[in-house]
Structures are given as structure tokens and as C-alpha cells.
Amino acid sequence: MVNVSNETPSRSVRDRILRSAAAAATGLAAAAAAVGVGESVAVFTGADTAPVYAVGSAAIDLTPTPLKEYAIRTFGTNDKPVLLSGIYLTMALLAALAGMLAPRKPLAGAAVFAVFGGVGIRAALSRPGAAALDALPAVAAGTVGFTAMLLLALLLRRSVRATLPTTEPDGHPEQLTASTAAGDQPEQPARDRSSHRPSRRSVLAATGGTVAFGALAGFGGRAVSDRRHDIGAARASVRVPSPAEPLPPPPAALHPAVPGLSPFTTPNADFYRVDTALTLPRIDPRQWSLRIHGMVDHPLLLTFDDLLRLPLEELDHTLSCVSNEVGGPYVGTTRWLGASLPALLRRAGVRPGADQLVGRSQDGMTIGTPLESVLDGRRALLAVAMNGEALPVAHGFPCRTVVPGFYGYTSATKWLVDLDVTTFASYDPYWVRRGWDRRGEVRTASRIEVPAPFARVPAGDVTLAGTAWATHRGIAAVEVRVDGSPWQVAQLAADGGPDLWRQWTHTWSSAKPGTHRIEVRATDISGAVQTEARAAPFPAGATGWHSTVVTVT
Ligand SMILES: Nc1nc2c(c(=O)[nH]1)N[C@H]1C(S)=C(S)[C@@H](COP(=O)(O)O)O[C@H]1N2
Ligand SMILES: [Mo]
């Protein structure tokens, strides 16, 4: 046994912590190199094939519906950054552990990266429409991670042996077995350690260099990818044609001038976004085409220019998401411009027996709409513009479907590339496979926006205001009540038509100081009053009355 008493206990503890930290750092460095190389290779195969993104997209598709609902409810539009952060953190933790294992078991530590690569390959190949080449970023990432971990671990191991008379081959701290001492280690007094600093420094340099390499490859790769697939210019150069018969601007009477009430038309920048796309599909309109096929007599293939040459129609419409909670924000009103979807389907010649129209997006989303509704005379569009500008990339550029009366998940395919005329019996689209209602008709909803929840308002007459929608049926009445007193009929703003939400106001006269609860309910054109019964968004949309609590002072 070698006497190591010249090392004070606190010093040895500190050294061990430092060594563990250094080992963990080598794992993190190998992970950085792996992720970075994955991003670089993805420059050629597409940003969505970068391993972390591929794994994220696969996770989104595999997430059970209740968890997905929870994520949308809790994180809202931030659900994607939260998911990516979760993946990075999990990977960092495992990489650090791999790094700590590696000095003793280099192959085992490196194998963790082979597993990462494997998971990435599996995820990339599981994406809809994936080609074998899409696995390349994950293959490269796994290989680089494996190699970097192995090399850094061997370097670290050598430096530890060179630096300290204490290796811990089987976890006995500060005890050197005779064979190790005889084999690797000439006895080294502590004062000699400084002469081996270069070795420690070289581990540090190698680790830092690996991180720098990873960062450069990663951020560089992302930047090149973004530049290479930038379609901002292509989008800016789209000249949106005028509609055949322009609609007048929305009349001012649609919107009561109450501060705090949402605008009647939602600005594009504020329009809610809900989709499963971790990286936005970036489609060059010059390369885009739309196939209309299935149970039709004459399948069609349209280019973007073909589409723009068709007579274009405008549609003022309130789009909402089935995941919207009572009183929630996933609803917006916009003016779409696009080609008539029913006209194109008639041109293709729909065969008898077909009852479902399935839109497919470039990123593999599938959305099914009842065909008889598309053809029943409502204005259904292949939309190319929103509020007077080409569709924003996040909202489906260059083309999406819009069919009034349905939630987005059964009517509004963004990044549309394919329309399949089929049957409900033969095909379940993405959300239906996950248990959601196959029709997805919008339920009557109403919302109190003014006063804001938990607002403090002065006693006296208080203005209440909000919006209500029952898309494609239309709103006939809105009622409000305070503290469970009898319902009062609210004043409706002008009616823009059944496809639009309707704003309302009501004066709550002589409000008394204290805490009060305000409730709202709407009646649609058919005379059906919104049900009080609370239902969660899954599987067919939330129900229940929205209420808000205010303090009168
Ligand atoms: N390609 C694609 N289209 C999609 C989705 C999607 O995940 N992918 N989500 C749908 C859902 S659930 C809704 S509510 C609407 C939302 O459209 P928006 O993001 O433009 O508001 O898009 C629909 N179209
Ligand atoms: Mo949705």
C-alpha cells in the first residue's frame, strides 16, 4: 500500500469533485460535438432532420393526448421551446453521466452516444415521408459523439493517472492496488504534481476545443440552414392577386369601441398558432404543387401560378382550435383570400360514395373534413393570403385549406400539398387516430374580455364586453349575469355573417363594492343555448360558461 497521507482529506475530496466535474464536462463536450455535427449535416438533409428536432417531432407524435392537452394548456404557444429544452436537458444529464463513467469504462461511456445516435436515427426515419438519407445527421452525430467521448475519456484517464498516485479502478478511494502502483505509477510526491499540469491543461483544452467545435458546427449549421432554406424573399415576391369580387372592408359597427376588447379582425402577428411543427415547413412557391386525387374522375395537379390564375374569393372567418379552453385565446378572425375549393373539386369530378376530404401537409399532417360540408355552398378556400398579405409561414405559406364551421384540426391544413377525396370508413387522419372527434364542428362559445379577470373597477355602472362565436351557424343572443342573478340580454354589435364571431357589450348598472362573479352564455342561430356543463377540449371541444371575477371598489 502506498502512503497517501501527505494529501489532506479536504484536499482529496476537492480533487475528486474536480475530477468528477472534469469527467462530466467531457461528456457534455462530446454531446455538444454530436449535436453540432447533426445540425451541420442537416444543412443538406433539412433542418427537421437534425437529431434533436427529429426526436422532438417524434415525441410530439407519440405524446399521449392528455399530456399534449396539458402541454398546450400549461405552456401555450411556448410548448415547443419547452419540449426542446426538455430534450436538451435530458441529453445533457445523460451525457454528463456518460462522461463520469467513461474514464473507468471508456467503451460504455461512448456507447451512450451510440444509443443517442440510434434514437435519432429511429426518430428521423419515423417521420412521415422520411427517406433513408434523413438518418444521416443522426448517424454523423452518433459517430462523432462516440468518438469524442472515447478520445476525451482516454485522455482524461491518462492525465488522472499521471497526476495522482490514486486511481480508483474499482471505487476504493485513495487506495492504490499494488499492481496499479507497480504498473502505471511511479511514486509521486505531491510537490511533483505541478510538473504534470500540461496534461491536465491538455484535457481542459481538448474538452474546451470539443465544445467550441460543437458550438461552431451547431450554430453555424443552423445559420447556414436558415439562410439556405430562407423563403422570406420568395414570400415577399409573391404578388397576391385581387379577388374577383372584393368584399367591402369590415364595417365599424361590428366592433364596439370598448377599451380592452379584442379587435374585430385579428392582426396576423397576433393570430394564434397551433400545430405540431417543431421547425416550420419552408416551401418555395415555385417548387410547390397541389395534387387533388382519390375518388375523382380527373385528378388535378396545380402549381402555385395555376392557383393564382384562378378566380380568387375573400372569406371573413373566425378560426378556432378544438384545444381552446372555455375563455381561452386560440381563436382569431381574419380575411382569407383563396381559390374556391368546391369549384376545384367539381372540376376534378367527385365520385359517388366519397364522404371525406383529407388534406395532407408537407410535414405529414393529415386533416379530414366532411366532404358534403365542403360542397354544400359554404365558402371553402384554398387560401393563399391572410389580411391582405401572403400567408405567414407559421400560418401555412404558401397554401392552406379553410372550411368554415369546423375547428382547425378538421378543416385548416397548413402547408397543404395534397388533397385526397376518400371516405371516413377507409381513412383516419392524424387527430382522429388519437381519439378526437372525426367531424370537429365548432361548438358555441362566448367569452368575457372586459373587465379583465381579477380587475378592480370603481363602483357604479360597469361596462362588460366580449366576443361569442358559433362559426357557420352564427350567434343569435348573448346573456350575462352577475353573482347568479337572473340573466340579462347583452347588446350585440352588428352581425358580420355566420362565419364570424360577434362582439357584445352590456352595462352592469350600479355595481356595489365587493367581489363579484360575472358569467356569460350565448345562443346560436338554431336557438340552442350554450350548455353550462363543463367539458374538457378532448375529444370534441370544450363546453361550459365562461366566468370572470372582478373587485368593485
Ligand atoms: N400542417 C398542419 N396544419 C394544421 C395543424 C398542424 O399541426 N399541421 N394544426 C391544425 C390546428 S389544430 C389548428 S387549430 C389550425 C391553427 O391554424 P393557425 O396556426 O394558423 O391558427 O391549424 C390546423 N392545421
Ligand atoms: Mo387546433
Image (cartoon, grey):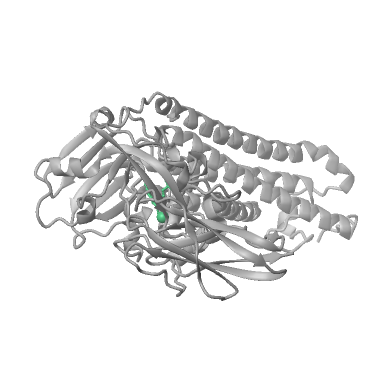
Q: Residue 302 location in percent, x, y? A: 22, 34
Establish if 483 lies above or below 369: below
Where is residue 138? Give x, y as percent. 45, 44
Quadrant field for ligand 2: bottom left
Is residue 185 left or right of 487 when viewed as pictured?
right
Q: Nearer the viewer, residue 403 or 230?
A: 403
The image quadrant where one finds the C terminus is bottom right
Determine which quarter of the picture holds residue 348: top left
The residue at the point 90 percent across, 55 percent down is 6
Q: Quadrant of the N terminus?
A: bottom right
User: Please, is residue 342 above or below residue 246 in the view?
Assistant: below
Q: Residue 220: which quarter of the image?
A: top right
Query: What is the x, y in percent for residue 416?
Result: 31, 42
Q: Position of residue 144 (x, y in %)?
A: 52, 40
Residue 540 in sight from this viewpoint: yes
State the residue in front, 227 or 472: 472
Image check: 532 left or right of 197?
left
Q: Residue at x 38, y 48 (%)?
A: 496
Pick the residue in front: 235 or 532. 532
Task: Residue at 37% x, 47% y: name it.
Answer: 317
Numbered-mark total: 0
Q: Nearer the viewer, residue 74 or 206?
A: 74
